[in-house]
Amino acid sequence: MSGTGQLTATEQRGAGGTGVATSLGGHVGYVPTVQAGIVVLDLRNHKEIGTIQPGTVGLLGPGAIAISGNGRRLCLLDGGFLQPSGTVQVISLSNR
């Protein structure tokens, strides 16, 4: 990769985010937060388009997040890095 990136937008989504996952095409972002579960962002238009409420999360909110290779599932580590539970939730993204 060469050249310099340009900041196009910033989003304030609350405390607890431990990562960001993007959709297969890179147009949708998924951000775990303590207050709202997983915030779903339209990265082309820089706006929130929804939220996903995971089953249960630890006191510090959701942990690490990843998208499956085919873009149909979101994997979420419960409890964050400071309080890991050892549980991974798999959430279907087929309707998104």
Image (cartoon, helix red, strand yellow):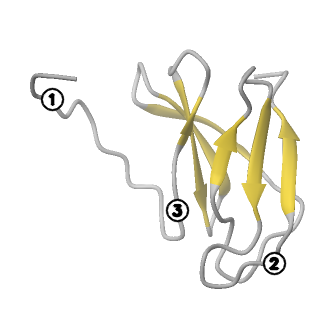
Quarter-of-image position of residue 96:
top right
Name the kind of residue labelled 3 in the image.
Gly
Q: Which mark is residue 17?
A: 3
Q: Position of residue 58 (x, y in %)?
A: 76, 78
Mark 1 Cα within 10 Å, few/some/many (few <14, many 20+)?
few
Q: CA distance from mark 2 to mark 3?
A: 17 Å
Q: Residue at x 61, y 56 (%)?
A: 32
Residue beneath the point at 65% across and 65% down:
63
* Residue 44 place in picture, x, y as percent: 41, 19
Instruction: Name the residue carrying label 2.
Output: 85
Residue shown at the point (83%, 21%) measured from the top left: 95
For label 1, the SS is: loop
* Mark before the other along the chain sequence, 2 or 3: 3
**51 versus 79 height, above or below:** above
Q: Which mark is residue 6?
A: 1
Residue 42 as seen in the image, left or right of residue 2? right
Mark 2 to mark 1 CA distance (whole Å): 37 Å
Q: Are marks 2 and 3 in contact (CB under 8 Å)?
A: no
- Which is more N-terminal, label 1 or label 3? 1
Please state which of the two labelled residues, at mark 2 or mark 3, is closer to the viewer.
Answer: 2
Left or right of 91, for residue 64 = left
